[in-house]
Image (cartoon, grey):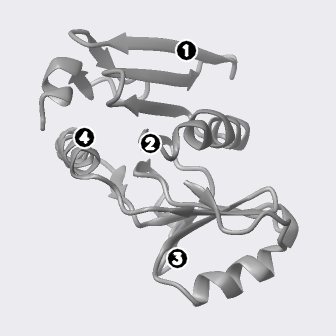
Amino acid sequence: MSLLNERYSTYEQFEMERQKTDGRLEYIDGMIYMSPSPSIKHQEISSFLHAQLYNVLKGTKCKVFAAPTDVLFDNNRPNEKKRVVPDLFVACNPDFFTENEYVGAPDFIIEILSPSNKSHDMITKLNLYMNSGVKEYWIVDPMENRIMVYFQDQDLDIQFKLALLGEVVVSNLFKGFKVDTKDLFSTS
């Protein structure tokens, strides 16, 4: 993940930049970020998790989406909008979809780390997601073979758990969604 420019931009400037490229751009707190194409290992992990989530959610109102589907966090104030492209997200409210994006906080988001996006996903996006109402956020780290799970409890306090290689992690939100890290990290 790299900054497209090092100066602050308005949301309108971001939208103009977005129209000029087919690249994946994100906008958070006045900064424009550009994502490089993901690695094969990243895509294998994403496909594995997408398939697992799809099977768990089949027949429910919740749907799983993969990048490059945009999520717009919109406070109805132009310079407070934030646009991201999560690796995977689950949305349970169909009313928040437009033709091209999801407007609002998805229920569940998964980001898969790569060397270029580690701090962006672990700091910038963690803060955005947890402060915007995402109920559960998984950070999958294939370099360390671990999954970091952040979730809101009943009191809306943020909790954390860590699943290391050989452990099984279970979603707090979707109890049927279980991932054995041994299976996940042996995908490639």
Where does label 4 land, which residue? 49
Circle 1 Cα neighbour tier, 10 Å, few/some/many (<14 / 14–19 / ≥20): few
**Separation of residues labelled 1 and 3 (CA atoms):** 32 Å
Q: Quadrant of residue 188?
A: top left
Q: Determine which of the numbered discs, if any, sits on residue 111 in the image.
A: 2
Where does label 3 land, which residue? 98
Circle 2 Cα neighbour tier, 10 Å, few/some/many (<14 / 14–19 / ≥20): many
**Separation of residues labelled 2 and 3 (CA atoms):** 22 Å
Closer to viewer: mark 2 or mark 3: 2
What residue is shown at x 68% (from left), y 41% (from top)?
124
What residue is shown at x 21% (from left), y 38% (from top)?
56
- Which amino acid type corresponds to the residue marked 3 in the rendered image? Thr
Where does label 1 land, which residue? 160
Between disc 1 and disc 3, whose residue precedes? Answer: 3
- Residue 20 relative to residue 179: left or right: right
User: Above or below — where is 23 with respect to 20?
Assistant: above
